[in-house]
């Protein structure tokens, strides 16, 4: 996906993130989750596995368990809480579905952030909303640069005995606040300098042109046509009830022949980057 035209990549992620948001059928959620995790593993290797185990898995368990505290609906009662509220099968399955949706959306957005770099966003939206795109591109760069600068400042202060691991509890708190204050000041100054630099270069002025390395190729046309065809088929089938998923008061899921066709189209679309990479290596 990184080598495709930004328009193709944007429409691909828009379709997959939208499907992860809208479709609550458990199979569709499983497909979205599997596609996002496989793509993230393809992009980030061991870093993706660490992110899954340290963030996504705890988030999934927390979101699934938290739903039980607020959901009392359902007709299949399994047990009762000490407070007297019922624990239903429907609330458990709905909580798992919501947790899967949340994790899938976060994973797809992480893939989006890895593929859609700031230069691609500027290329797509720079003329329509230059100020918004500049703010967005700066925001995408902010977190890694902020973290890296904080580590540099902490290492410098550690050399003079003012790190968060040195001194008593009060001194460590003061050292931490000092590191944070220096880093925030650096971030604000950097933002002002970036804005002034872009203004000096005429960013956002009418008629300003920009160099672009992105070229529309036949491969982009074929991939875009495939993505749009699959997305249109899935949306049409879902509108006809092929992905119906009702959890309350009783569970009602669509299992008609159209449903399995939609599952196949969704699977092909979600696993497209992973299959492409596997075929590339095999060839």
Image: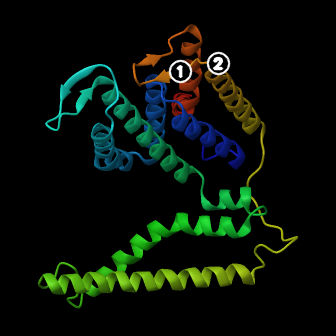
Q: In the drawing, does residue 143 fall left or right of residue 10? A: left
Compared to 119, does 20 lie above or below? above
Residue lying farthest to the top in this orientation: 257
How packed mark 1 is, by other alpha carbons closer than 10 Å (few <14, some 14-19, many 20 or more), is some
Q: In the drawing, does residue 155 fall left or right of residue 233? A: left
Q: Quadrant of residue 73?
A: top left
Residue in the picture at 45% in, 46% down: 106
Residue in the picture at 45% in, 66% down: 144
Compared to 32, does 78 lie above or below? above
Q: Could you tell me which quadrant the C terminus lies in?
A: top right
How packed mark 2 is, by other alpha carbons closer than 10 Å (few <14, some 14-19, many 20 or more), is few
User: Which circle marks residue 244 in the picture?
Assistant: 1
User: Which circle marks residue 240 in the picture?
Assistant: 2
Residue in the picture at 56% in, 40% down: 17
Secondary structure under tag 1 reads: loop
Between residue 124 and residue 90, name the one nearer to us: 90
The Cα–Cα distance between marks 1 and 2, rounded to whole angstroms, is 9 Å
Residue 158, can we see it?
no
């Amino acid at each position: 996906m990184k080598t495709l035209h930004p328009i193709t990549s944007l429409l691909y992620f828009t379709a997959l993130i939208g499907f992860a948001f809208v479709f609550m059928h458990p199979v569709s959620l499983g497909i979205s989750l599997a596609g996002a995790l496989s793509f993230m593993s393809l992009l980030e290797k061991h870093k993706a596995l660490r992110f899954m185990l340290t963030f996504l898995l705890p988030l999934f368990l927390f979101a699934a368990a938290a739903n039980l505290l607020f959901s009392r609906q359902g007709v299949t009662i399994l047990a009762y809480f000490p407070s007297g509220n019922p624990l239903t099968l429907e609330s458990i399955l709905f909580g798992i579905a919501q947790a899967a949706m949340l994790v899938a959306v976060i994973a797809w957005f992480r893939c989006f952030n890895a593929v859609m770099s700031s230069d691609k966003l500027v290329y797509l939206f720079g003329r329509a909303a230059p100020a918004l795109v500049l703010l967005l591109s700066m925001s995408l760069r902010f977190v890694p640069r902020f973290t890296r600068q904080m580590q540099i400042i902490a290492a410098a202060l550690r050399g003079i005995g003012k790190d968060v691991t040195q001194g008593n509890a009060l001194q460590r708190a003061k050292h931490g606040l000092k590191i944070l204050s220096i880093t925030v000041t650096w971030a604000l100054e950097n933002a002002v300098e970036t804005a002034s630099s872009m203004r000096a270069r005429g960013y956002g002025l009418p008629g300003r042109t920009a160099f672009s390395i992105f070229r529309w190729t036949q491969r982009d046309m074929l991939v875009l046509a495939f993505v749009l065809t699959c997305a249109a088929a899935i949306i049409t089938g879902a509108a006809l009830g092929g992905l119906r998923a009702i959890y309350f008061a009783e569970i009602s899921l669509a299992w008609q022949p159209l449903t399995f066709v939609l599952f196949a189209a969704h699977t092909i679309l979600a696993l497209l980057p992973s299959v492409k990479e596997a075929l590339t290596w095999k060839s």
